[in-house]
Image (spheres, coloured by chain):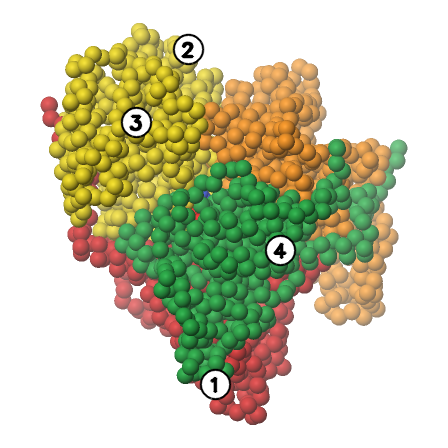
Chain colours: A orange, B yellow, C green, D red
Amino acid sequence: MSSQVAPPRKGERRELDRVVIRFAGDSGDGMQLTGDRFTSVSASFGNDLATMPDFPAEIRAPAGTIAGVSAFQIHFSDHDILTPGDQPSVLVAMNPAALKANLKDLTRGGLLIVNSDAFEDRALDKVGYSANPLTDGSLDGYQVVQIPMTSMTVEAVKESGVSKKEAERSKNMLALGVISWMYSRPLEPTIAWLEKKFAKKPQIAQANVAALKAGHAFGETAELVAYEVRPATLAPGRYRRITGNQAIAYGLIAASVHAKLPLFLGSYPITPASDILHELSRHKNFGVRTVQAEDEIAAISMAIGASFGGHIGVTTTSGPGLDLKSEALGLALSLELPLILIDIQRGGPSTGLPTKTEQSDLLHAMYGRHGEAPLPIVAAYSPPSCFWAAIESTRLALKYMTPVILLSDGYLANGAEPWRIPAVEKLPDIAVPFASQPNAGEDFWPYLRDETTLARPWAIPGTPGLEHRVGGLEKADGTGNISYDPDNHHLMTLLRQAKIKAIEEDIEPLEWDGDEEAKVLVLGWGSTYGAIGAACRRLRARGKKVARAHLKHLNPMPKNTGEVLSRFETVVIPEMNMGQLSKLIRADFLIDTISINQVKGLPFRAGDLEQRLLELV
Amino acid sequence: MSSQVAPPRKGERRELDRVVIRFAGDSGDGMQLTGDRFTSVSASFGNDLATMPDFPAEIRAPAGTIAGVSAFQIHFSDHDILTPGDQPSVLVAMNPAALKANLKDLTRGGLLIVNSDAFEDRALDKVGYSANPLTDGSLDGYQVVQIPMTSMTVEAVKESGVSKKEAERSKNMLALGVISWMYSRPLEPTIAWLEKKFAKKPQIAQANVAALKAGHAFGETAELVAYEVRPATLAPGRYRRITGNQAIAYGLIAASVHAKLPLFLGSYPITPASDILHELSRHKNFGVRTVQAEDEIAAISMAIGASFGGHIGVTTTSGPGLDLKSEALGLALSLELPLILIDIQRGGPSTGLPTKTEQSDLLHAMYGRHGEAPLPIVAAYSPPSCFWAAIESTRLALKYMTPVILLSDGYLANGAEPWRIPAVEKLPDIAVPFASQPNAGEDFWPYLRDETTLARPWAIPGTPGLEHRVGGLEKADGTGNISYDPDNHHLMTLLRQAKIKAIEEDIEPLEWDGDEEAKVLVLGWGSTYGAIGAACRRLRARGKKVARAHLKHLNPMPKNTGEVLSRFETVVIPEMNMGQLSKLIRADFLIDTISINQVKGLPFRAGDLEQRLLELV
Amino acid sequence: MTEQPTERGITEASGGVATLTRSDFVSDQEVRWCPGCGDYAILAAVQGVMPELGIPREKIVFVSGIGCSSRFPYYMNTYGIHGIHGRAPAIATGLATARPDLQVWVVTGDGDALSIGGNHFIHALRRNVNLKILMFNNQIYGLTKGQYSPTSEKGKITKSTPFGSLEHPFNPISVALGAEASFVARTLDVERKHLPEVLRRAAAHRGSAFVEIYQNCNIFNDGAFLALTSKEGRSQNRIYLEHGKPIRFGPNDEKGLRMTGEGRIEIVDVASAGEGSLLVHDEHREDPALAFALSRVADGPTGPTPLGIFRDVQRPAYGDGMEDQLRRAAEQQGPGDLSKLLTSGDTWEVTV
Amino acid sequence: MTEQPTERGITEASGGVATLTRSDFVSDQEVRWCPGCGDYAILAAVQGVMPELGIPREKIVFVSGIGCSSRFPYYMNTYGIHGIHGRAPAIATGLATARPDLQVWVVTGDGDALSIGGNHFIHALRRNVNLKILMFNNQIYGLTKGQYSPTSEKGKITKSTPFGSLEHPFNPISVALGAEASFVARTLDVERKHLPEVLRRAAAHRGSAFVEIYQNCNIFNDGAFLALTSKEGRSQNRIYLEHGKPIRFGPNDEKGLRMTGEGRIEIVDVASAGEGSLLVHDEHREDPALAFALSRVADGPTGPTPLGIFRDVQRPAYGDGMEDQLRRAAEQQGPGDLSKLLTSGDTWEVTV
Ligand SMILES: Cc1ncc(C[n+]2csc(CCOP(=O)(O)OP(=O)(O)O)c2C)c(N)n1
Ligand SMILES: Cc1ncc(C[n+]2csc(CCOP(=O)(O)OP(=O)(O)O)c2C)c(N)n1
Ligand code: SF4
Ligand code: SF4
Ligand SMILES: [Mg+2]
Ligand SMILES: [Mg+2]
């Protein structure tokens, strides 16, 4: 791995094609912000990149403890990359806890930058270091750069006249300055950003800027090795970074605009889905209504009410909330109203690992309702793809008058990647007409279906002459009146199923890439997209023949899925669960799939996947 | 079919091997009671039999309407039978609505006994008869026996001195009297029963007895054909009739007695599960605690609390309630506490067809929880088998410290069959020990598992020294402390799965019967047991070679399932859903199963199944 | 698209209110309640009041949960949703918040509203969502054939409590007041005048209007309200609350209610106590304490029981506040501009 | 099976109550709340009171839902269940009903108890299940990092309400009283004496004891209770309710509460109004109207706010009633006989 650097000679300048840096410190040390600033600069500089925050568990742990460590990892390069990187080649550790929690991930021989001031005895004890790792030789395998960040910062920000406490809080900027120098990043954007952010507190701004510059100067005077990572050649256009949750919120707003329908979100806060509620509640000028409901059942019920009223009803949640929405989801399905249920998957079962990622809600999404209750399932596969997934889910919901489940997960939700901002006018027009007049002679039949889509008409309150009642009891085909007729129930069951199945005609076919002669197909869905891609790339680099395909629609699957799978001798399915997609593929296509399962609350490492796949190709 | 009787000559006596009678009338006409009395007498007479009530939808419809018709069907014979019969060969219709609603089912040439008094114009109009079917020749294809039941009854009960209204209400007894004569049933048991029931109202008793006798006398004097159906040769022993819901209640009480643990039911009323709550709440002298909770979530949560306290926690429900219990079920699974969730399946999705039967909750039971959350699933297959299912579910829950789902359905719940009462001392001892002392040196580790069952110890409050906390967050293997460790989460996921999988070693293997050389296996689960059995029997009678097997454990399936299935070229799976067991079999065994699906809210008719299977064998 | 949805996605209604009659609100569905059920009278009253409201049919929606009472929407020739058990207030909250131009009615039962639906019920009241909530209280689960409900008296023998219920019942008026309800009333299915009048008042209230309607279930709980419906009881036990009037009742108004210095309401003989000492009803009292005290005059409909409007105060309706925020946001930030949104924050250009 | 479960399936406890100390109730788990969180003080108070109760550790169970507050059970060296969000009262109801020999405590938050858990909360109170319910009210969702809760003041700016919340908050004391609670109290996390005293009273109450504890979330809602905790506020705004005493407050008890003839409670100057006119607190008043009126003296902790026990009346606890029915059933029908049960009703013999 090119990021595996040999100990460099002083003053030397090296070129790298990619670097993985992890900033780690106490929850209070501002590591997320530090990483964010560095990412921003690298992005504008033109590198491709992917980032992954690693928050501590929901509740703040006491300062200086392992549980309290907060980290941010960025992978940037001169070519397109797919993941935030397996192992950092550079680790910035602001205290002993951060070192202890993250050292195991640092590549051997990697660069380790530590805040030596933080390594006094009490801090060491707190995390069970009997001896000081900076002096006991246990770090010999790495290039260690010790910087007394705290004291240097305090020194540097004197003029600003901020309190000592305030001063020390700027040490993350000092660390950023050092790294900026090492990777030849300009300071200006960050300085501008700081001055804007602390416009009201010029002292604070001044202090942070001073710390930033001090770090940069230190790098220069201490003659740390400087590296260069050239810009990547990305498709031309305007870019921004975006997280999965932000992309979902923007996608929903875009869908609302392009459907010419107002957006209504009913949601109950839950990690890691809450940020979608937070983001959407900020855009009231788009006519977006957000209600923080009393619970998940109310949240989806409210969305159903809004959909009946002609709005795009949306509800967002995570695992436990998905459980609670099951019954109301069945109602939406029986009422045949458009609804988008967004599930940001997290570690289960039960409360599980709320802040960690997993893909274990797929079969629940497929079958987690009583009765025969099929609905479309769309899965995002990268942070930016969440934008597409939101629009696609809305398109299907409106066109087929059905609830749709959009699956994302904790990794996509919080991870960020550069996103080429689409031209608004290029976005699809997904508007559908409301019913405006009787469709059965004088009468209006709410369940008289469209021949092609099998969708029922959407007649909203306020439309004279179309007054009608809908409910969860079985309905007579056409009239929609309550019906206990056995044959009608069978027919309606078939119709509800046929309506969803027919969607396979209306979605992109499954694409695969790789060597024509490849015997092995690596099939994935959701957030494993990047890791699978990177692993396959490495296998090809090793001269192995392998193909890969990624499902973006889980129900129905693209029409050509069976045909694609049948081209290969072996279908390998890596999943962050115990093999849920495998179950579906096996049942539908009778293929003896090979599963690669990891249920650790963490995304696959491309390297691990590469190793696992090596045994198979 | 022997029940296909040719028009008989007066005074003649005929022998039949089986008869299917349907009593149909208005909700107020007491048809359920009439059928029940006839069943009771036939049972004591020694016939084998199966019955099926057909209630109107939940809400009472106005008198005399189709929606208000209530019917009861009994199939009795001189040999063992498996279903309540496809089509009645005898139909008793108390009014025009009953005739209109049920005539289509009567076998051609069948016997039709009508209450001619009820066929006046208003009643005919109400159900849209333009002409009187008794006179317009539309019934020519049947043997019609017209009896002015209402007036005859009023006449007959004069002495008793009851009001005219009361008198008319006895006409169901007159009908029973007629049928009793035709099928040579003694009146004494019913007379005794009436006198007991109305001990406090001798007049009413007298009236009913008079009506009964009058009906019997009418049969004789009118020289209706009399039939005889000999007793069946059943295994010796004491018998009773039992419905599925009653059998579940008794099974739970038996399990409680044989586990030496008190039973706790948390339930919220829902059709068709409510009767289990009703039945269990009557047996407080067994120490059975029943709580009618505020909703389904509370109901299962209460059961979890009781299980933590050392009781057998049970919760009963139907589809919509199963949805609501998903999240708490996941908690029970994560806490690894014993719990029995009983789902009486009904027509879905959503509110669906509350009073009708269906098998469409299987996949929901398998996968209807977020995260990787496997648990055992047991399925009853006949009304009496519900007794076994309840004990078996409890055995697994206690031995493996896991929630278990027991699946029954509306047909089993209300259907009744003779049940050979088991000897109490022959029932299995399913007691398990509570933890009583530390298991890790000085300490107690709530997740230190038993090597063989992988069950965790059950330490209940009140046990000194074993104080411990459990919760829904991921737990460290052994200690049970909260753990965010990635490898531990993977390990715990594997352990939870392995624990359930291992149960395959501890359940009866899958049995199959039929011809050694059969190429086709008919595989079923749940309430299709009788219909599949009858259909296969008929196929064999036609000289066809066919085998059948029935799954009583759906998860895990018996260890030999794959081996059994592999013996056959074709596996056909009839289900009252769109192919849910098929999905499981296909995924697990990669067998291209053939599905026979019916989603009509009604059980399969053996005859229909026979026809469908004929195309395949 | 034959008809363009307006900004708010609502095809404009004809608006013009042709004068309607009762029959305009009768749907074509066969009514399916037991003969003699109190629900019939309530249906008739509601259908009778509708035309007076001057709201076009298409702007009215009835939302219900599950239960006998919840079949109600099928019989109203308006828009309607027969929802799932207990969730009607939540479904209606979404609809009323999305569509403040509609008049949304919720029809529910004592089990639907107070058992499984209790949480949505109290939150709808707290938020003061613009809903008219009619709770048919028959003190039993009718549709599931007769189990006790949260309003059934303690000791009640039902299918699920053969030895008698152990549960202390809710007083629905007290629950609503404890949940910050802005309009709270009680009436009776058999009240030919009072019931429609209360419905009118509820319809006129902007915000959540809760109406408890005692309803006789003649099949599973017949006579539950005899203390108020028997010839004797009617005159003895109905206490009509009238705003601004001293609270009197009895065949000849000879009895009255008085508030003691310890804040206890007692029944007094007007003659001896003197009319001046009687409690004067005040529907509009900000503080709900008086209404609450009145709700405790009768723990159940077994003796003298207040009927009428306990409380009617103004508080911004939830949906209106939402409209307000949307309008102000649009004014301050300008109407939403999608490309401006997508390009907000740090962006950079990549050129070839 | 080393130890036979007794009839009721409960391995008999040592019973003998060795005198315990605070440390006996401290578990080995590292406490994981933000430094400065009010939860620490409550934990200390509870651990401090436990030994006084004379109940062996193994007979005590703490049940919680989800939230910062709900981590509580992990820190108590007793039996404990960290449940799911909002369901603690239901889980605890099952446990307390199955095991009336235990003392069951519920620890919950304002979101856990009043938002998602509202229905179970009001039903537990109505049934009077033998539970001690401690609700840590920080008027915010702490664990999910700062959204408003059902007790947050209207207009509150949070992550989910950047333009201010539109929701009128619950008054938890009023909700509890409207739900028929038999014991209702309020105290403060920083109350070193009052908090433990209220806990003792709750522990002594057989039935549902609800205690609202104002708790400061210094990360997401710091200072929410300043009106009661600031040096100034402490003396001006804490109204201590004491049974049988006229209700007075203020630095020198110069202010008091008086009940008007219209059932309104007003704050008066004692000197001018005269002590005799003051409202005398009565915890044991059957009718909850007085307690309710007191709960309305302060809509939120922003001005003079009553603290202490609003209500404490006796009503049979749900679980005890259940035991009763079981005992009587066993007496009347005799202990359950399985084969008698199975052979009940119509049976017949088949012989060969
Ligand atoms: C989730 C769910 N649980 C339970 C039921 C069964 N159920 C239907 S209505 C009802 C209670 C009806 O009582 P109430 O609300 O008082 O209405 P009523 O029939 O008395 O008018 C119940 C328990 C259901 N349909 N759905
Ligand atoms: C079913 C479900 N929905 C949502 C969540 C997310 N969640 C956890 S705690 C919480 C609210 C916490 O607020 P509160 O009850 O006031 O407790 P606090 O953290 O303030 O002590 C929420 C919304 C969850 N864990 N489970
Ligand atoms: S069961 Fe009772 S409430 Fe239901 S329709 Fe019949 S009478 Fe009315
Ligand atoms: S977030 Fe608030 S409530 Fe939660 S632990 Fe921190 S300070 Fe306490
Ligand atoms: Mg009711
Ligand atoms: Mg809180």
The amino acid type of the residue labelled 1 equals Pro
The amino acid type of the residue labelled 3 equals Ser
**Which residue is denoted by mark 2 in the rendering?**
B616
Pointer 3: residues within 10 angstroms few (<14), some, or many (20+)? some
User: Which of labels 2 and 4 is toward the front?
Assistant: 4
Mark 1 in CB contact with mark 3 (< 8 angstroms): no
Q: Quadrant of the C terminus of chain A?
A: top right
CA gap, disc 2 to disc 3? 46 Å
The disc placed on residue D246 is: 1
Q: Quadrant of the N terminus of chain A?
A: top right
Please give the chain letter of the residue carrying mark 1: D
CA gap, disc 3 to disc 4? 56 Å
Q: Secondary structure at mark 2?
A: loop
Mark 2 in CB contact with mark 3 (< 8 angstroms): no
Query: With respect to residue A474, does B289 lie above or below?
Result: below
The reply to the same-chain question for discs 1 and 2 is no
Mark 3 in CB contact with mark 4 (< 8 angstroms): no
Residue drawn 31% across the image and 48% down it = C159
CA gap, disc 4 to disc 1? 41 Å
The reply to the same-chain question for discs 1 and 3 is no
The disc placed on residue B116 is: 3
Q: For residue A186, say whether it is visible.
A: yes
Please give the chain letter of the residue carrying mark 3: B
The disc placed on residue C89 is: none
Q: Find residue B406 and report its horizontal and vertical position in percent.
A: 36, 36
The disc placed on residue C130 is: 4
Q: Find residue D11 and report its horizontal and vertical position in percent.
A: 27, 55
Pointer 4: residues within 10 angstroms few (<14), some, or many (20+)? many
CA gap, disc 1 to disc 2? 89 Å
